[in-house]
Image (cartoon, coloured by chain):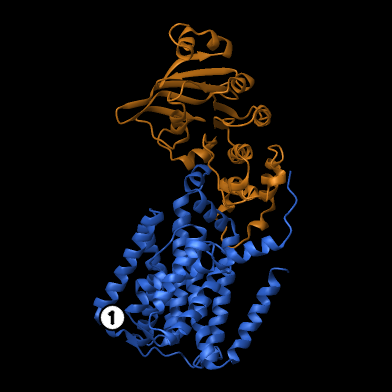
């Protein structure tokens, strides 16, 4: 119960937010979409210890797939979403087969390079992707099972529901034997192998699952913006997602959500004051890595631990 | 009694260095075998060949009625080979209990469960907690392993190896760096292990060797130079020469 109550309160607050001024609702939609993207990366980065620097690939490819299905083939929202998840999952299955043989900085470089391949493809494959112009005019259906998606507030609540379900699923996965095994791989891959775990299979499965969840974020994004372009596949999206995870707390349940919320807010606040907000983000990144490598959640935990009297020694 | 582990002319070279050279060995079921020898004799390399972390450059290895020469490490673990490491090799940011849980579920089908919480498998907790008691780690079960004392980490190292229910257990210097009291505690655990487990032990501490083992193999420059009961090995002239120098 102690764990459920704060989440219930947070959920209630999030629902109430739907009646805030529309600018805040807009920010909240973006924060939720990026929270979902950061959560998907956290499974790979925080639990399995595999820092993907190319997560925009699954986000963006799902967005493109949804746009192509609904614009070119007149597919419904559901068809576009399912097709997009299949594309993101397929791409993760392909890229994961190449990347999960490596780890550490090599994994980071390979995933970044693969991500850039998708970005280059979006630029050059003009007949499908519209090249530099992207694909504008992706329309939200007015109603999905009686839910008013065309309305921003309705779409916000829909995004909230999808993100909450994804959050619950990901928490469930990290609490499962599979999730424990991922943590073991992060802490000692060789030892996991001698304990008898097929380590590669776990890494690969985590990679594909992570890619599919990133695809969910991509679908939400393209139907919100009504537009997809090469910038949705750009490495800056990947970098931003890594930053969200680190800022919030890598390998924690709530960290990526917090990190995404803080960054989306900061970006929108800073960009009204200065065009150099990317530099500010860079400085934040350096400060976090230097002084709070366990992120906001880690700092909060440390604080609360100090506030509570220390436990009596076990022995 | 039949041999559960057979090595036939097993060799391993690193470039020009012959670390293990034509070692043949038969280990009976239930045996307590010590492998001793000076530094660089090839003891740990031999363990790595048996556990599969290294592949031999020559010879064959048979364990539990199977040719395991080319089997990857995790398949050997599933077959019943367990080992500990000379340098502690644990999961430092996870708690003692989480470390044990990972080891206990390693060979269970449920290790793939994706959407059921770990808590919903009480038998895993029962086994993990049951192993912590005899190792003296019960009180530290919620402590991250990185903050345990070195002695406790060595105990846990042994616990992880036992969790997989090994039939052959390779212990690489289980008491290295321990205080006399901690050494006695580890010795008690090893002596208390059932005879269904065959034990091979690398050790420099002769009180441990004589306290546990009935058979000793002496390795020198990658080769077996003596083999027999502790008494026989103690009297062996070659062994005396290696350990005490040419004058002895």
Q: Relative to A34, does residue A46 appear above or below in the rendering? A: above
Q: Dot 1: within a 10 Å radius of its alpha carbon, few (fewer than 14), some, or many (20 or more) residues?
A: some
Between A126 and B173, the residue placed more toward the observer is B173
Across and down, in percent, residue B128 comes to 66, 45
**Apparent side of residue B81 relative to residue B195 in the rendered image (left or right):** left
Instruction: Tell which subunit mark 1 falls on.
Output: A
Which chain: blue? A
**Apparent side of residue A306 relative to residue B11 in the rendered image (left or right):** right
Disc 1 is placed on an element classified as helix
Q: Relative to A248, does residue B210 appear above or below in the rendering? A: above
Question: Can residue B200 be seen at all in this image of the molecule?
Answer: yes
Identify the residue position indicated by label 1 in the image. Answer: A128
Indicate the quadrant where residue A67 lies.
Answer: bottom left
Across and down, in percent, residue B67 comes to 44, 31
Indicate the quadrant where residue A278 lies.
Answer: bottom left
**Apparent side of residue A297 relative to residue A116 in the rendered image (left or right):** right
Q: Count how many numbered circles sit on residues in the image.
A: 1
**Apparent side of residue A17 relative to residue B248 in the rendered image (left or right):** right
Across and down, in percent, residue A265 comes to 50, 81
Q: Relative to B226, does residue A167 appear above or below in the rendering? A: below
Taking the spot 44% from the left edge, 81% from the top edge, the residue there is: A221
Question: Can residue A148 be seen at all in this image of the molecule?
Answer: no
Q: Relative to A218, does residue B110 appear above or below in the rendering? A: above
Which chain: orange? B
Taking the spot 43% from the left edge, 74% from the top edge, the residue there is: A281
Across and down, in percent, residue B195 comes to 64, 27
């Amino acid at each position: 119960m102690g764990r459920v109550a704060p989440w219930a309160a947070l959920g209630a607050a999030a629902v109430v937010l739907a009646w805030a001024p529309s600018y805040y609702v807009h920010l909240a939609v973006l924060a939720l979409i990026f929270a979902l993207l950061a959560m998907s990366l956290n499974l790979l980065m925080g639990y399995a210890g595999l820092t993907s620097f190319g997560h925009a690939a699954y986000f963006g490819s799902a967005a493109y797939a949804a746009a192509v299905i609904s614009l070119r083939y007149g597919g419904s929202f559901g068809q576009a979403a399912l097709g997009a998840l299949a594309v993101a999952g397929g791409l993760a299955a392909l890229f994961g087969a190449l990347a999960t043989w490596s780890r550490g900085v090599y994994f980071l470089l390979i995933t970044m390079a693969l991500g850039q391949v998708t970005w280059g493809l979006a630029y050059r494959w003009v007949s499908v992707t519209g090249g530099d112009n992207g694909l504008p005019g992706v329309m939200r259906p007015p109603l999905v099972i009686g839910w008013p998606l065309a309305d921003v507030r309705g779409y916000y609540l829909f995004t909230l529901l999808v993100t909450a379900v994804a959050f619950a699923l990901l928490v469930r996965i990290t609490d499962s034997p599979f999730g424990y095994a991922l943590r073991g791989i992060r802490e000692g891959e060789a030892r996991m192998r001698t304990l008898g775990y097929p380590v590669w299979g776990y890494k690969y499965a985590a990679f594909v699952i992570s890619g599919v969840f990133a695809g969910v974020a991509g679908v939400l994004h393209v139907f919100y913006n009504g537009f997809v372009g090469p910038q949705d596949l750009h490495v800056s999206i990947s970098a931003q997602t890594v930053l969200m995870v680190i800022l919030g707390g890598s390998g924690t349940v709530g960290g990526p959500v917090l990190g995404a919320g803080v960054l989306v807010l900061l970006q929108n606040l800073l960009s009204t004051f200065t065009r150099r907000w990317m530099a500010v983000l860079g400085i934040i990144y350096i400060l976090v890595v230097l002084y709070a490598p366990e992120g906001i959640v880690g700092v909060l935990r440390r604080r609360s631990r100090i506030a509570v009297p220390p436990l009596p020694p076990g022995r | 009694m039949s041999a559960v582990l057979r090595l036939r002319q097993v060799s391993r070279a690193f470039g020009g260095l012959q670390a293990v050279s034509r070692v043949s060995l038969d280990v009976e079921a239930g045996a307590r075998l010590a492998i001793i020898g000076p530094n660089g004799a090839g003891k740990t390399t031999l363990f790595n060949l048996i556990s599969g972390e290294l592949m031999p450059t020559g010879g064959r290895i048979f364990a539990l009625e199977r040719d395991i020469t080319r089997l990857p490490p995790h398949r050997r673990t599933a077959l019943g080979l367990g080992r500990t490491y000379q340098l502690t090799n644990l999961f430092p940011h996870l708690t003692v209990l989480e470390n044990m849980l990972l080891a206990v579920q390693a060979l269970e089908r449920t290790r793939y469960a994706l959407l059921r919480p770990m808590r919903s498998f009480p038998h895993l907790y029962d086994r993990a907690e049951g192993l912590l008691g005899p190792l003296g780690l019960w009180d530290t079960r919620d402590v991250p392993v990185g903050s345990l004392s070195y002695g406790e980490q060595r105990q846990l190292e042994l616990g992880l190896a036992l969790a997989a229910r090994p039939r052959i257990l390779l212990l690489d210097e289980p008491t290295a760096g321990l205080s006399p009291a901690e050494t006695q505690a580890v010795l008690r655990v090893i002596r208390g292990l059932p005879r269904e487990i065959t034990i091979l032990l690398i050790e420099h501490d002769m009180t441990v060797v004589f306290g546990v083992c009935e058979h000793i193999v002496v390795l020198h420059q990658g080769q077996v130079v003596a083999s027999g009961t502790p008494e026989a090995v103690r009297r062996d002239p070659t062994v005396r020469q290696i350990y005490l120098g040419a004058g002895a």
